[in-house]
Image (tube, rainbow, N blue to C red):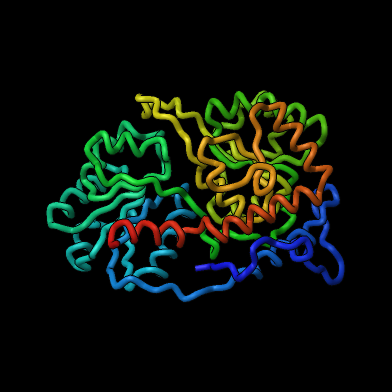
Amino acid sequence: MVHRTNVKRISHAVLRGRVHGGRDGYASGYDYGYHLARCQSVLNTFHSLHEERRHVRILYVEEGSLGFTTIDLGIQRALSILADEVVIVRHYEDAISLAESVRPDLVLVLNGISAARMSQIQHIRERGYRTAVWLMDDPYFTDITAGFVSLYDYIFTYEAGTVDFYRQLGCSRAYYLPAAACPETVRPQLVEPGYRADVTFIGTAFANRIEFFNKVTPALVKRKVGLFIAGRGWDRLKDWKKLKSSIDLRGVMYDHNIRHYSGSRLVINLHRSEDEKLNSRRLKALSPNPRTFEVAACGTLQLTDVREELPRFYERGSEIDTFGSPEELVDKIIYYMSHEDRRSTVALNGLYKTFQSHTYVHRVKELLSIIFG
């Protein structure tokens, strides 16, 4: 686990860091190397501490899809620090046979949304093993999750807006457990020029995102902002022909998105709409997504739309910044691109807060405390 030393707030001198020799160039002459040196100064205020391990054996059932790789790795890493023994069930493996072999004190599942996993967990629960699920895609699939949460002894969800919903279904042990970042894999990185951009957005082109970006990209194109977008469906943008050289329709692998975040001056985080067909109850999304913590952990300034729970994690204008309209987003992009020191300082404060309070070790420690006392 990372832990802060006795530093109440990062001093201006620490934030600025020291750079010996030349400074690396970046998009539009941005001082990329200098910012990385400041990031390292922040990371140097943390050191590894020995965490007291619980004498428990845990079977962790990974989600397994590419979109959840960073989360899977973060949880696995945290469990390896906090528990005596951890056995990983890969997405293609049978959880029943491994449970019988390992005889765990806890079977922890990430999402568990496939029919095969539901069947396996039912058999595992019938054999008397303690089970827990951590739902990291609420409320978008609640029509499905409502049908299997009763299979678990404990329900954890990263979405505050669904806790009462699960309790109303009879799951008395349903808890809010937010997303986080894994410092070992998600952190500031020195990346090649191909990963550098002024502004980055990575994510699927859901309808609300297309509508929003159609109002943003004309201003960015006009100002010749270096933009990078990755994800399926972005060829539906009105400015597609002008931007196609800056858009990767294949998306990016989990480790590459961290490089893109690290190499960008600004990262946009626009949450998807809760108006999804598998959220027929229209449960409201209140909590920040995993990307919120991952971008902050990369030492990059994030501009995000507002979620009700966001102030619980980051201070607006000091550790993160927000927008409420396409026009406000454009204004803030222009502002931060011309106020480099301010942009860097807010990004560094977000990095510090993430390592201080929002890692998967923090979250898994809370999970284990709830279950084992």
Position of residue 155 in the picture relative to residue 285 (left or right):
left
- Tell me if residue 229 can be seen: no
Position of residue 129 in the picture relative to residue 36 (left or right):
left
Q: Is residue 84 above or below residue 134?
A: below
Q: Which residue lies furthest to the bottom in this view?
A: 50
Q: Is residue 296 above or below residue 251?
A: below
* 166, 101: nearer the viewer: 166
Instruction: Please state, as top left, top right, bottom left or bottom right, where the C terminus lies in the image.
Output: bottom left
The mark total stands at 0
Residue found at x 49% / y 68%: 1
Measured as percent of width and height from the top left, residue 207 is found at: 54, 25
Measured as percent of width and height from the top left, residue 122 is found at: 18, 48
Find residue 3 and report its image quarter: bottom right
* 286, 200: nearer the viewer: 286
Residue found at x 56% / y 52%: 294
Measured as percent of width and height from the top left, residue 240 is found at: 67, 29
Position of residue 46 in the picture relative to residue 58 (left or right):
right
* 327, 10: nearer the viewer: 10
Measured as percent of width and height from the top left, residue 176 is found at: 39, 45
Residue found at x 84% / y 42%: 338
Residue found at x 66% / y 27%: 325
Q: In this view, does 195 lie above or below 37?
A: above
* 84, 67: nearer the viewer: 84
- Tell me if residue 341 can be seen: yes
Q: Residue furthest left?
A: 127
